């Protein structure tokens, strides 16, 4: 006990700058490339945000950032006056919420089912299969979705036809686009996201289940009174952290699946920022919309972490 | 949940059986789309014309689509570009990650908290697409392979995970080496790195899969088609062959659609994904470990 206390004291002892530089000279040198990288690739672009308040175009040049005409909140006002603001914010939030409602419980249910089956091999194979989509790139997943939902012999439409229905162009219809997006997300993430809950379940003492059996508990009693209470803290932590991501409706999947036919339901802030910025070259406007989104996201993430900490969890930092 | 099958109630047995079935169904739902893509990549145009658009099991396994793709310059250059990005990117990323993570694992290193705070903030706030694009353009990386590597060298999660691995190395080992007269660099090379090989392997795999799958940098920073990674080549094959607005309203029994385009698309998906599928069984467990560490706390 005393030795332990002594060791902690040594570790926590503050070095003076001089001593630290002497003791860790080489480590400071090793830190230089990483710190420079963060400065160049993460912090320098932050100065570029200034163009959101300027009249800055693709031909203004880098020096132009300092000389371009200052327009204040003009681009922000333009965005909020346009028809896009409402549609994009609504689509982003609705898609995120639908994903949350469908995908979040699905992973928990999957973990519960995996925890329920006895025997290792079956469980292992299901896990291996269900984690696989996580390793595929968004482009590959989107291509698979395009292929199987194709009206030209895609698997899903063939099943619909066999059942006597009419083929549906899932990716080109405002009625089905969001649903397709949510199910794609489910397909890609359900297995992977169950890992954390399964890990929490391995910490459950098996004798709790045995005791419950002896007491005459049925399967749903065991889930409700043993499994769920054990993973409840991690569920609430994950839920809160997800809420911090509400503005992120998933650029990668949306971008690879949407088309102008479904802008009404499928266009999200990120895809709009991309189109306005890189396709239409409206640098200032696109950056203004992006800044709006980043600031709201920042507030959400900070809020969700504050919530996680208030719950006695560690948060992400 | 059940260790002994004898003492359980009938209802619980039913529940276990239902769980078995549901899990099997889930596995099917995940696997069937992939298998259908693989099968469709082997269907010949003639067979499609004869038997209809969807073939559960081809009578003959036709490899024309693969031959076409392997003969295409773009697939070839795509693979070369992806290999470059993956190998060089992973190598440099690991170098940077280790060099940054190790000093930050020293609790009494002055300035550590300031640097960590600076790094944390970049996880919360990103400048956005256009400012990043302007930076890459300004430093002259536009339309070079380096644009796919340099801006993505450090992944903060991976770096913090590496730092946590370094924490776990007992200080006593490093102190012993120090007392033996080793300097900081020697301690890293002879003590720290050999002890961290498993974690270095894990983080390298994270980076490698990330670089292999990356497609957005190619969309954003490249106009030269010869520099595009295989993901982007595949993307353009898919988008060119379908997915355009012209496809809206094409009915299932429309015979005017080229039968090989579907096969070609499927084959391009397969050749982009096979390398991942080959390594997947070996790397899976490392990623699962990482997910458990990373999803709660970095």
Image (cartoon, coloured by chain):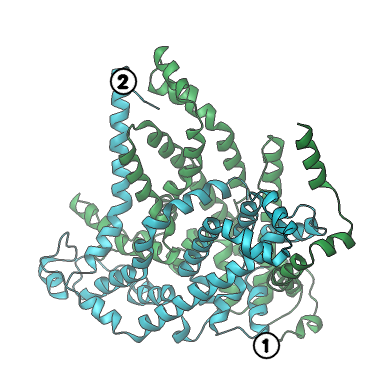
Chain colours: A green, B cyan
- Secondary structure under the numbered disc 2 in the rendered image: helix
Q: Nearer the viewer, residue B279 or A297?
A: B279
Q: Which residue is mark 2?
A: B11
Chain under disc 1: A
- Same chain for labels 1 and 2? Say yes or no: no
Position of B223 compared to B248: left or right? right
Residue at the spot 70% in from the left edge and 50% down from the top edge: B171
Residue B258 seen by the camera: no
Circle 2 crowding by C-alpha within 10 Å: few under 14, some 14–19, many from 20: few
Q: Position of residue B169 (x, y in %)?
A: 64, 51
> In screen coordinates, is A213 left or right of A288?
left
Q: Who is closer to the viewer here, B101 or A187?
A: B101
x, y percent for residue B19: 32, 33
Residue under label 1, please give it. A59
Vertical position of residue B32 compared to residue A305: above or below? below
Report the front residue among A169 and A283.
A283
Residue A299 — which label? Answer: none
**Residue A123: percent from left, percent from top:** 34, 40
**Chain of the residue where label 2 is placed in the rendered structure:** B
């Amino acid at each position: 006990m005393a030795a332990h206390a002594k060791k902690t004291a040594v570790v926590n002892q503050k070095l003076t700058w001089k001593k630290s530089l002497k003791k860790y000279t080489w480590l400071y040198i090793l830190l230089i490339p990483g710190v420079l990288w963060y400065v160049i690739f993460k912090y320098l672009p932050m100065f570029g945000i200034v163009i959101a308040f300027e009249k800055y175009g693709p031909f203004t040049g880098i020096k132009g950032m300092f000389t371009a005409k200052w327009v204040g909140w003009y681009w922000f006002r333009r965005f909020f006056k346009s028809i896009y603001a409402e549609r994009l914010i609504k689509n982003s939030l609705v898609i995120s919420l639908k994903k949350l409602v469908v995908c979040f419980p699905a992973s928990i249910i999957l973990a519960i089912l995996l925890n329920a089956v006895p025997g290792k091999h079956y469980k292992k194979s299901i896990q291996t299969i269900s984690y696989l989509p996580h390793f595929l790139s968004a482009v590959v997943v989107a291509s698979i979705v395009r292929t199987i939902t194709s009206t030209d012999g895609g698997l899903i439409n063939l099943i619909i036809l066999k059942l006597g229905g009419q083929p549906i162009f899932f990716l080109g219809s405002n009625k089905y686009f969001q649903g397709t997006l949510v199910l794609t997300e489910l397909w890609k993430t359900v297995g992977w996201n169950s890992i954390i809950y399964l890990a929490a379940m391995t910490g459950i003492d098996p004798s709790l289940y045995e005791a419950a059996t002896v007491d005459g508990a049925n399967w749903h009693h065991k889930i409700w009174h043993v499994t769920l209470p054990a993973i409840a803290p991690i569920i609430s932590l994950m839920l809160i952290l997800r809420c911090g991501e509400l503005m992120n409706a998933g650029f990668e999947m949306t971008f690879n699946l949407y088309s102008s036919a479904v802008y009404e339901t499928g266009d999200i802030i990120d895809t709009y920022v991309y189109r306005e910025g890189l396709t239409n070259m409206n640098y200032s406007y696109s950056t203004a919309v992006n800044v709006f989104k980043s600031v709201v996201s920042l507030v959400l993430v900070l809020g969700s972490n504050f919530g996680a900490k208030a719950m006695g969890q560690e948060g992400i930092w | 949940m059940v260790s002994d099958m004898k003492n359980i109630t009938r209802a619980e047995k039913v529940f276990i059986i239902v769980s078995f079935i549901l899990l099997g169904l889930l596995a099917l739902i995940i696997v069937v789309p992939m298998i259908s893509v693989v099968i469709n990549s082997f269907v010949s145009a003639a067979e499609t014309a004869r038997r209809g658009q969807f073939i559960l099991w081809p009578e003959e396994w036709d490899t024309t689509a693969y031959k076409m793709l392997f003969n295409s310059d773009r697939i070839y250059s795509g693979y070369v570009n992806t290999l470059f990005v993956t190998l060089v990117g992973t190598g440099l990323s690991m170098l940077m990650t280790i060099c940054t993570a190790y000093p930050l694992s020293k609790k009494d290193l002055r300035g550590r908290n300031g640097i960590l705070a600076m790094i944390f903030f970049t996880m919360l706030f990103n400048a956005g697409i256009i400012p990043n694009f302007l930076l890459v353009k300004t430093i002259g990386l536009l339309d070079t392979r380096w644009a796919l590597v340099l801006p993505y060298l450090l992944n903060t999660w991976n770096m913090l995970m590496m730092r946590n691995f370094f924490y776990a190395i007992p200080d006593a080992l490093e102190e012993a080496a120090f007392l033996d007269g080793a300097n900081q660099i020697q301690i890293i090379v002879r003590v720290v790195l050999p002890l961290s090989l498993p974690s270095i392997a894990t983080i390298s795999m994270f980076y490698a899969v990330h670089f292999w799958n990356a497609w957005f940098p190619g969309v954003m920073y490249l106009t030269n088609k010869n520099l595009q990674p295989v993901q982007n080549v595949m993307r353009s094959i898919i988008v060119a062959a379908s997915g355009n607005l012209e496809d809206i309203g094409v009915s299932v029994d429309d015979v005017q659609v080229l039968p090989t385009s579907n096969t070609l698309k499927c084959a391009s998906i397969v050749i982009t994904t096979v390398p991942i599928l080959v390594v997947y069984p070996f790397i899976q467990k490392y990623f699962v470990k990482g997910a458990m560490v990373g999803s709660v706390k970095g």
